[in-house]
Structure formats: C-alpha cells, structure tokens
Image (cartoon, rainbow, N blue to C red):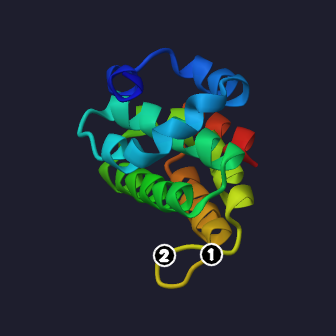
Amino acid sequence: VIKLVHFQGYDERLIPVLVELVPSMHATTPFLEELLSTPDPSNRSFAIQLAAHVAAKYPFLQTETAVNVALQRMREAVSSDARDLLVRTVPLLPKMAATFPRTGIAGGVSMAEQAVQMLASVRKGGEEELDEAVEEAF
C-alpha cells in the first residue's frame, strides 16, 4: 500500500511533515530509485523531494544511492531545460549535500561539489523563478 500511495503521489508540501512525523516513512527507501526513474516530470519532482527528505532523516547507504540518482535526474533536468522540476527541487540541494557531504559518484566529485556545480549551471539560465529557487538554496 505504501508503494502505491507514493507512486500515485500526493501534495509535495506534505513530504517534509510526513517524513518527520511518520516513523514508517523509512519504508519508502527500497523503492525510491524506482520512483526516481518514472518519466513523468511531476512524479520525478515528487520523487526527488521524497528522496531528499527521507535521506536527511534516514542517512543510510540505500538513501545515499537514491540521492545520487536524484542528483542525476536533476542534472538531466538542467540539460533538458525542465524548469518546473528545477524550481521545485533546486532548494533541496543543500539538504542533500549536508546529508552526504563527502560522497558522490560523478567521477569522485563530492555531493556538495555536485550540488554547487548544478546550482551554478542553473543560475546561468537566468529566469527569475529559477533565480529565486537558487537564492533559496543558498
């Protein structure tokens, strides 16, 4: 049931509250990577937000892997110009970097460095809404 609920999604504003107050949210960990692989941008945004919050609360190897996948999806969004996804997920970069600061899979680049690189490349886009998201992240 928990997998079905998360694949159907719910209001993204509930994610931080649910992760903080519902002890069983760690049960989403086994399917985070699968959820992050969905092609729909709104589902992908939901999955990135869920991965960031679950990883911050439960910083295990499996959530670290999910955060790496989330960063990859965000990198793909930067290169494909998926602005809506970026506006909703860029503010989570500091949370991901703070949770796993010394790890990263992109050629040995730390999670924190990956986050800063992504923020810098998003910032070059120059759209006001994205600029606000980047400012919030910093």
Up the image or down, 40 lies above or below 51; here it is above
Residue drawn at point x = 61 percent, y = 61 percent: 115
Residue that label 2 marks: 105
Mark 1 Cα shell of 10 Å, populated few (<14), some (14-19), many (≥20): some
Q: Give the camera-side residue of 31 and 114.
A: 31
Q: Can you say whether 105 is above or below 128 in the image?
A: below
Where disc 2 sits, the SS reads: loop
Is residue 18 shown above or below 31? above
Q: Residue at x 40, y 26 (%)?
A: 6
Name the amino acid, label 1: Ser
Residue 17 in the figure: left or right of residue 89: right
Q: Is residue 127 visible?
A: no
Instruction: Measuring from the top left, give residue 46's x and y in whole percent.
Output: 45, 31
Residue identifier under label 1: 110
Q: Nearer the viewer, residue 98 or 33?
A: 33
Location of residue 8 in the rendering, given as x and y in whole percent from the top left corner: 33, 20
- How many labels were placed on the picture? 2
